[in-house]
Amino acid sequence: MIQFTIEDRNGDRQPIEIPEGINLSLMEVLKASEYNILATCGGMALCATCHVQVLDGIEALPDAQDAELDMLDTLPDAESDSRLACQIRVDERLEGAIFRIKGAEN
């Protein structure tokens, strides 16, 4: 199992456990876990409504690609630890990471 933590917009933290090899994005896991995240483009890095802040573990994640970086550049509250949840694949690199939801709500 891969375990990481999600902090919602109220600052409440909840651990999430996902089986290894599930082949989902963090955005898909957040939606399946009933977090209120808009994700309007469905994971194409076109809307930034799945914006998350990586509070711990960013060094283990693969670097953001150009499409993700371009979209993050449009956000007024994006920081150096900002990512789009749709562009983060859930795998062993997420073990122990902490993500804060920043994107738009439904």
Image: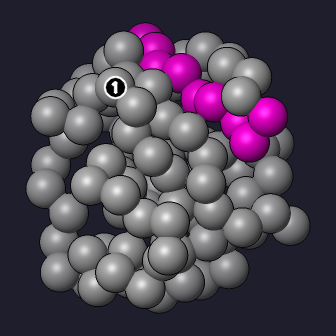
Residue 100, percent from left and from top: 56, 39
Residue 99 in the figure: left or right of residue 10: left
What residue span does the magenta drawing correspond to?
Answer: 1-10
The residue that appears at 50% across and 51% down in the rendered structure is 52
Q: Residue farthest to the right?
A: 106
Q: Is residue 83 magenta?
A: no
Residue 28, percent from left and from top: 59, 53
Residues 77 and 99: in front is 77
The residue that appears at 71% across and 36% down in the rendered structure is 8
What number of labels is visible?
1
Q: Is residue 4 magenta?
A: yes
| Image position of 66 with respect to 1: above or below | below
Question: Would you call the spot at circle 1 few (<14 residues within 10 Å), some (14-19), or many (20 or more)?
Answer: some
| Residue labelled with disc 1 | 56
Residue 47, percent from left and from top: 54, 84
The quarter of the image holding the C terminus is bottom right
Q: Name which quarter of the figure residue 69 lies in.
A: bottom left
Amino acid tagged 1: Asp
The residue that appears at 39% across and 39% down in the rendered structure is 54
Residues 68 and 55: in front is 55
Q: Main secondary structure of the magenta part?
A: strand
The quarter of the image holding the N terminus is top left
